[in-house]
Image (cartoon, rainbow, N blue to C red):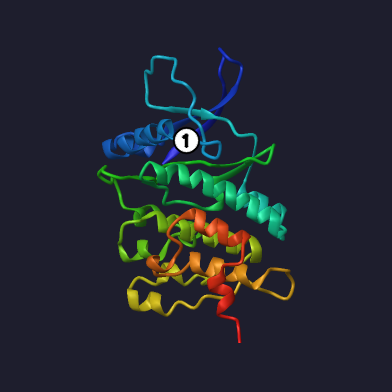
């Protein structure tokens, strides 16, 4: 949907990123409107864990967006370099992503496209969410549906099941995506394999079988598995209500999970 360039701001000497609509989209008014909405979203969010737009000081002669340049790598690349991260490291990354998502949720926005490719880790270890192309803003007409944007299996594996029923995403949809990333970081796998994108009815989604994240090779407490299982429930109303609840459950054994194992 867009082209991205690394550039230098001659006035400040700083490296920045310039994003322009792709050639295919330049004759599509709806796509251009969506492109401009990304900058509108970025300017309203103020979080250390969300990509920042640069100040607009020049008169624009064309459509483009300028953002900060993040010196680092995507979480997708980081996972290739660190295939078996320890639990404290995983918690630290997830907590920072959750803070970024909370910045969207506080402004009644649903991010909708959380995946390792849209998460950057900079040279200081700060984690930032990038690319707001699928973000839904409460009260604004949708240009296109999330299901049309989730056209690649890689992205679809992180998408909440309700999207495949044609339902609108909520904050719990973002919690699902974060849960999948947590699961992947601890196991290298996905909680339901590749079955979620194929399950396009409620009956099919009820048959989805969660595969425990626990393995003989990794030291992971059983209650962590319970926390992730709740976050990735196919039924959105069975998930955590808020991101803070999920993050808390990743750090502290939830009494609800511990009680079920008592004799």
- Residue 124's x, y, as percent? 69, 37
Q: Is residue 26 above or below residue 81?
A: above
Q: Residue at x 51, y 44 (%)?
A: 100
On the rendered structure, is 241 left or right of 228? left
On the rendered structure, is 11 left or right of 161? right
How many numbered marks appear? 1
Q: Secondary structure at mark 1?
A: strand
Q: Residue furthest top?
A: 11
Q: Quadrant of residue 223?
A: bottom right
Q: Is residue 25 above or below residue 253?
A: above
Q: Is residue 27 above or below residue 233?
A: above
Q: Residue furthest bottom?
A: 263
Quadrant for the N terminus in the image: top left
Q: Residue at x 62, y 50 (%)?
A: 93
On the rendered structure, is 75 left or right of 118? right
Quadrant for the C terminus in the image: bottom right
Q: Is residue 55 above or below residue 165?
A: above
Q: Residue at x 49, y 54 (%)?
A: 243
Local crowd size for mark 1, using a 10 Å CA cut-off: few (<14), some (14–19), many (≥20)? few
Pick whichever, 219 or 69, lies toward us.
219
- Residue 23's x, y, as percent? 39, 35
Label 1: which residue?
Answer: 3
- Residue 160's x, y, as percent? 42, 62
Residue 173 appears anywhere in the view: yes
Q: Residue at x 48, y 47 (%)?
A: 101
- Residue 102's x, y, as percent? 47, 46
Pick whichever, 200 or 85, lies toward us.
85
Residue 150 appears anywhere in the view: no
């Amino acid at each position: 949907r867009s082209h991205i360039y690394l550039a230098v701001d001659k006035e400040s000497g700083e490296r920045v990123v310039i994003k322009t609509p792709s050639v295919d989209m330049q004759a599509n008014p709806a796509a251009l409107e969506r492109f401009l909405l990304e900058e509108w979203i970025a300017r309203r969010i103020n979080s250390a864990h969300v990509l920042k737009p640069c100040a607009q000081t020049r008169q624009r002669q064309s459509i483009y967006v300028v953002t900060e340049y993040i010196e680092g790598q995507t979480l997708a690349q980081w996972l290739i370099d660190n295939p078996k991260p320890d639990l404290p490291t995983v918690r630290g990354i997830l907590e920072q992503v959750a803070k970024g998502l909370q910045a969207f949720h506080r402004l009644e926005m649903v991010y909708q496209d959380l995946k390792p490719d849209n998460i950057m880790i900079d040279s200081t270890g700060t984690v930032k969410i990038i690319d707001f192309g699928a973000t839904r803003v409460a009260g604004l007409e949708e240009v296109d549906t999330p299901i049309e944007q989730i056209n690649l299996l890689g992205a679809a594996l992180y998408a909440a099941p309700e999207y495949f029923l044609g339902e609108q995403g909520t904050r719990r949809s973002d919690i699902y995506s974060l849960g999948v990333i947590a699961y992947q970081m601890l196991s290298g796998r996905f909680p339901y394999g590749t079955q979620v994108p194929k399950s396009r009815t409620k009956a099919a989604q009820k048959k989805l079988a969660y595969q425990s994240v626990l393995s003989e090779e990794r030291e992971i407490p059983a209650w962590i598995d319970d926390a992730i299982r709740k976050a990735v429930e196919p039924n959105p109303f069975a998930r955590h209500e808020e991101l803070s609840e999920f993050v808390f459950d990743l750090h502290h054994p939830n009494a609800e999970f511990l009680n079920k194992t008592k004799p």
